Image (tube, helix red, strand yellow):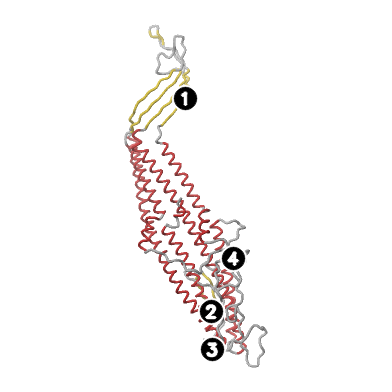
Amino acid sequence: MGPHRPKFPRQRPLLPFEIPMIRLGSSRFVALWLVGSSVSLASVAAAQSPASPVSPTPITPGAPGTPGAPPPVVSPPGAAAPASPSLQALPPGAPPPAAVPLTDFGVQGGALTAEIVGRRAAETSYNAKAAEENVRAAAAKVDQAWAAFLPRLSAKASYTRLSNFTPPNFGGFTIPIVVDQWSLEAQLVVPISDYFLRINQAYSAATRSQEAARLDVVSARAKSSSDGRLAFYNWLRARGAAVVAKQSHEQAKTHLQDAKNQLTVGNASRADVLRAETAVAGAELAMERTKNLVELTQRQIGVAIHSKEDETLSPNEGIEADPAPFVGSLAQLVSEAKTQRYEVRSIDANAEAAKRQIAAVRGGAYPSLSAFASAVYADPNPRRFPQVDATGKTEWFGTWALGAQVTWSPNDTVTSLASASEIQAKLSNAEQQKSAVRDGVELEVTQAYQGVKEADFAIGSSKQQLASAEEAYRVARELFLNGRATSTTLTDAETELTRARLEQLNARIDARTARVKLEHALGRDARGFDR
């Protein structure tokens, strides 16, 4: 393949799941996808400064031959040694470059873990607070329904001024007119039939609605907690990607120096040096993009937990350990989710409330039986005759009454049956929604379960990929330094090594995010908020 000048990648906004890398030796821009992949990160000797938690961790140059270490120089016979005293020739058969020690970039001595972020996100969730207001409204309706059990007591005080006129004379006997009338009345009504037909059903409906509102609060807190934990792991993913980008940059600089050394001894062309320079520029761009991605994901954490402006966000959870295997078959997990998921339970509670509402509304179509008692204390009392004494004066006088009554209106019957039909339609709608939610839950559990299995498999596979890529890079660099391989071969090895690191990183992150999603799909994460 003839030498040619590699092109810089066309600049465009970086998607959150992309890390740009330059593939040396060709004009093609390789985008290594961040989502769905993974890494045991080769490490960083200096930890990140707490004052700048979003900047990538610097890498201290290691042993000769490692990424970030000064590369050896092969000088031609009789040629002067390069100016840098740290560059030494790598003779044939020299030992391979030392491996970079592995550290866990997620452990920075901070205060945040996925569990802490999830709990704080749930506690400060605006959606959960809005759902709590719905619970308060439902509780008020329960109080209203409970008050309907009490007999209806009413009181009335009135004053009436009547027009004056000359009363008729009945053979010398006249009925005096009292124009000023005062009255105090009290009445007690006991809705006997409504206790059985309407009031009890309405109270049951209100309590079911309150339970549904409470379950909605639990669901909202669980969703916020799940989103917070996912945001935390995406933050670690971005931080890991920044470390990988830094390592790739160190490799590109080492490759550039190696290419210059090989050009000096005649084992490489000027085009090889230009390709290496292009790779360094591309790696620097990748570092900047991953740095911005770290800042974005860190801000997402701050928004999720509603942190204060002066709070320092720093992780304290590693990803080096393999997560515990998930127990249970897919069929068992789907069955568990369909019965225990709080969204499904909320729909069940609302459906039960609708059934009780239908019964309460239909009770209004029947005649209503009630008992009543009333007392009147008036001046003059209309039940007393004559209303004035011999002197023509009135006085306060009390009377009472007890009774029962049956009332019925055909208008109420039509209205009640129509309202019951309306609620029945809403109930059928809720039943269909429940079926749709259950189908969605089944797919969600299946997808999350497969994600767990795939991520666990990817951890083992990416370990093998990384080990092979590290050895391939070591061999390719040794051959290049001894003039037995081209710069393109070394570039391919560098690209595969970076890809393997990202695969390992993403496999470990995905193993954790998949478990968070599966726990949420099963409704297990909501149990801690059900209190």
> Which amino acid type corresponds to the residue marked 1 in the rendered image?
Ala
Write the residue at 42% across / 69% down.
Answer: 454
**Residue identifier under label 3:** 484
Badge 4 local density, few (<14 within 10 Å), some, or many (20+)? many
Vertical placement of 92 versus 218: above or below?
Answer: below
Residue density around tag 1, few if under 14, some if 14–19, many if 20 or more, within 10 Å = few
Instruction: Determine the residue positioned at 43% across, 19% down.
Output: 398
Mark 1 vs mark 2, CA separation in Å: 95 Å
* Residue ID for mark 4: 54
Eye-nearest disc, 1 or 2: 2
Determine the image quadrant of residue 386: top left
In the rendered image, which residue does mark 1 sit on?
157
Q: Amino acid at mark 3?
A: Arg
Residue at 49% over, 49% down = 130
Asked whether disc 4 touches disc 1, contact meaning CB atoms under 8 Å apart, the reply is: no
Can you say whether 481 is above or below 174 in the image? Answer: below
The one nearer the camera, 520 or 64, is 64
Amino acid bearing label 2: Glu
Q: Nearer the viewer, mark 4 or mark 1?
A: 4
* Relative depth, front residue between 414 and 300: 300
Q: Position of residue 110 (x, y in %)?
A: 58, 62
Q: Are the residues at dot 4 and dot 3 in contact (C-beta closer than 8 Å)? A: no
Q: Nearer the viewer, mark 3 or mark 1?
A: 3
Marks 1/2 in contact by CB < 8 Å: the verdict is no
Q: Tell me the distance, in whole angstroms, between the alpha carbons under discs 4 and 3.
A: 41 Å
- Pointer 4 or 1: first along the chain: 4
Q: Alpha-carbon distance for marks 2 and 3?
A: 17 Å
Disc on the earlier residue, 2 or 3: 3
* Residue identified by numbered label 2: 494
Question: Residue 162 location, x and y as percent?
Answer: 46, 18
Q: Who's the residue at 43% across and 39% down the image?
A: 144
Q: Amino acid at mark 4?
A: Val
